[in-house]
């Protein structure tokens, strides 16, 4: 029974030391998280025959400075939406 008490106490101590060490080390992901924001705007256009076309205006900007990094106007379709879902970065789509 004494060994279980020592094991439990040492496990609690190890977890406490690990949490303390994690709290004291800087995390670079917290600094860069949310650095870029993407705003989208759906634009509707209609010609004189009544045919509608849709475009999406993407604006990517830096949240720390407010500078616009990229603005792109893309035809709206399901194919493009699937490609955007597969991308790893906001700058990957073409």
Image (spheres, rainbow, N blue to C red):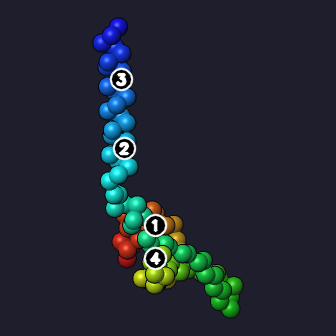
User: At numbered mark 1, what does the secondary structure look like: helix, strand or loop?
Assistant: loop
Q: Is residue 54 visible?
A: no
Q: CA distance from mark 4 to mark 1?
A: 9 Å
User: Residue 34: which disc?
Assistant: 1
Q: Nearer the viewer, residue 17 or 94?
A: 17
User: Badge 2: few (under 14), some or many (20 or more) residues near its Cα, within 10 Å?
Assistant: few
Which of disc 4 and disc 3 is earlier in sequence? 3
Which of disc 2 and disc 4 is earlier in sequence? 2
> Extreme top residue here?
1
Instruction: Describe residue 31's horizontal placement relative to residue 52 as left or right.
Output: left
Q: Looking at the rendering, in which quadrant would you find the N terminus? A: top left
Which of disc 2 and disc 3 is earlier in sequence? 3
User: Badge 1: few (under 14), some or many (20 or more) residues near its Cα, within 10 Å?
Assistant: few
Q: Which residue is mark 2?
A: 20
Q: Nearer the viewer, residue 44 or 7?
A: 7
Q: Looking at the rendering, in which quadrant would you find the C terminus? A: bottom left
Instruction: Describe residue 37's horizontal placement relative to residue 43 as left or right.
Output: left
Q: CA distance from mark 2 to mark 1?
A: 26 Å
Disc nearest the viewer among 4 and 2: 2
Q: CA distance from mark 3 to mark 1?
A: 39 Å
């Amino acid at each position: 029974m004494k060994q279980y008490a020592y094991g439990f106490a040492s496990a609690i101590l190890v977890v406490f030391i690990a949490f303390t060490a994690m709290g004291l080390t800087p995390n670079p992901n917290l600094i860069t998280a949310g650095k870029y924001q993407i705003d989208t705007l759906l634009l509707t256009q209609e010609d004189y025959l009544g045919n509608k076309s849709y475009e999406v205006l993407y604006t990517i900007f830096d949240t720390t400075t407010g500078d616009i990094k990229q603005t792109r106007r893309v035809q709206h379709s399901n194919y493009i939406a699937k490609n955007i879902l597969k991308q790893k970065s906001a700058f990957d789509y073409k």
